[in-house]
Image (spheres, grey):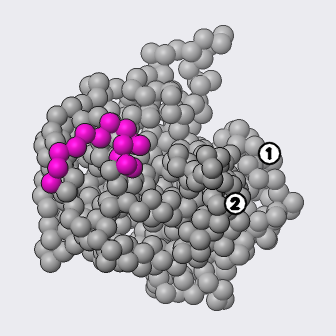
Amino acid sequence: MINISKRFPGVVALRNVSFEVNKGEVHALVGENGAGKSTLIKVLGGIHMKDSGHIHLRGTPVEISSPRRAMELGISVIHQELMLVPEMSIAQNLFLGRSPLRFGVLSVRKMIDATREILDRFEIDIDPRTPMRRLGIAIQQMVEVAKAVSLNAEIIVMDEPTATLTTQETEQLFALIQRLKTQGVGIVYISHRLEEIFRIADRTTVLRDGSTVGTLSSADMNHSSIVKLMVGRDIDQFFVKTNVPSTEEALRVEGLSNERIHDVSFRIAKGEILGVAGLIGSGRTETARAIIGVDRLKAGSVSVHGRKVRISNPRDAIRNGIGYLSEDRKKYGIIPDMTIGSNISLAVLKRFSRAGVLNLRGRNVMAESFRQKLSIRSTSVNMLIKNLSGGNQQKVLMARWLATEVPVLIFDEPTRGIDVGAKHEVYALMSELAKQGLAIMMISSELGEILAMSDRILVMDNGTVAGELPREGATQEEIMRLATGGR
C-alpha cells in the first residue's frame, strides 16, 4: 500500500500511509485509537475506497472496489467488530457468499461436513447448525478466524483477534499463525496488547494521526520505543492509582444467586476500586448484570450507602445510584446512528427536558464539556458516534455514566480495544473519580491493570467468589491459582 490517503467529512483519516507485508511474515500495525489503523484495513478489504495512492499485490497494481473483490484477490479481513449474521448458523456464516453447490443446488450436507472439518482444526466442538446468536463472543471470534483460514487467503488481517479469547484460545491462535507463516501466508496483526506484538511480529509499523511514523524490526522493538512512537511522548507512569479509599461503605451485595452465580457477596467503600478477576465464564459479568437488574435474582440483596435497594431493571439501578459500562459496547452501549451528544445524554434526558421538549443547547453544552474533559477525538458533539474509533466510543460511554453523577460505577473491561495512550487516560480518569469518592467495581481480564489499579481484588471461578486478595502482595500467579479452582 503506497501513499494511501482517505478523507471523511471534517476528518483526514489517512495521510500518505505506506504499508507492506511479505509472504510468510507477521507485520503488526499499531497506534492509538483514531490513528487510522481500521481505516487502512477497510481500504485493503474493499469497504472504503481510497482517495489517492496505490495498492500492489505480488507486484501488480490492483483496485479493490468491494469486500468480494478483496476476497477474490486472496485478502481476508477479520474485523474488530465481528462481521457475522446472528440468525444464521455457523455453517451458513462460514460459507456466506460461497455456498457449495451440487448440480447447481445448495448442498447443505456438503456445507455442514466442510464446516465440521474446519471447526475440528480449531478444536471447536460445536454443532455447525448452531445459530451464531447462541454462541459467546469468544467462540464467535474463533469462528471468524476459522472463516478467514477456510478461504485459503494469501493475506489475512487480524484486528484485535485475542480481545475476547482465553489464554488457551490465544495459544491456539498463535500456533495457527505460525502454521500459516510456514505456508507463506502474510499476516497483518493489529493489537493493543504489546506483549503479543513482541511475541509474534516480525516487523511493526506505527500510525499516529493518520500518518506512518515508523517501522521497526523485531530486534529493534521494545515497550518504550513503540509507546513513544504511538503517542509522541514517553509515558513514565502508566498506572496512576494513588488515593487511599474511605472506610465508609458505598455498595454491598450479599448472597447474590441465580442460574449463573452462586452466593456472591462483597462490599466496596467510597473512593475504592475493587478489581474483579477471573477467566471467561467465571461469573464476573453475570454478577454485574445481576446487580443492575438485567438478570433476575433468585436470592440476595444490594445495598447502596447502607440502604437496601430494589433493582428490577437498569433504570432502577440508575435511580438508586449505580451505573454500568458494558464489556460489549457495540451491542449494549452505543446507539450507532445517534450523535455523540445524544449518546452521552441518554441516561439524563430528564435533566434537559421540560414539558416533553428537549433543551438541545443545554444538552450540547454538557456533552461538549465531557468531550473536552475526556479528550474525545471528534469535530463536535453533533458527529455520529459510529464514525468514531472504538476507543473514542468507549470514552463517550464513560461520559454517559459520569453525567449521571451516580456514586457507584461498574466498569466491565473498560480498556478492551483501547490503545496505550487512551488506557493511560482511562486509568487517570478512574483514579480521579476514586479521589472524588466514587466506588468503582472494575472487571478486567488484564491482570496487570487489576494488580496496579485495585485497592482489593476479588477473584471469581465457576460463578462463585474464589477468594479475595489485598493490593499489597497480590501476584498474577495467586490470582490465576484462585481463578482456576484453587482456594
**Label at residue 420:** none
Eye-nearest disc, 2 or 1:
2
Q: Secondary structure at mark 1?
A: loop
Q: Position of residue 35 (x, y in %)?
A: 26, 46
> Which quadrant would the C terminus be assigned to in this image?
bottom right
- Give me the residue at 40% from left, 23% from top: 382
- Give me the residue at 35% from left, 53% from top: 75
Q: Amino acid at mark 1?
A: Ser
> Does the stretch in magenta take in 63?
yes
Q: Amino acid at mark 2?
A: Arg
Name the residue nearer the viewer: 69 or 448.
69
Residue 353's place in the image compared with 288, above or below, is above
* Residue picked out by circle 2: 109
> Does the stretch in magenta take in 67?
yes
Residue 347's place in the image compared with 410, above or below, is above
Q: CA distance from mark 2 to mark 1?
A: 45 Å
Badge 2: residue crowd in 10 Å (few <14, some 14–19, many ≥20) = few
Which region is colored magenta?
59-72
- Give me the residue at 56% from left, 68% from top: 118
Q: Is residue 473 left or right of residue 230?
A: right
**Label at residue 312:** 1
Badge 1: residue crowd in 10 Å (few <14, some 14–19, many ≥20) = some
Q: Quick one: label 2 or label 1, which is nearer the N terminus?
A: 2
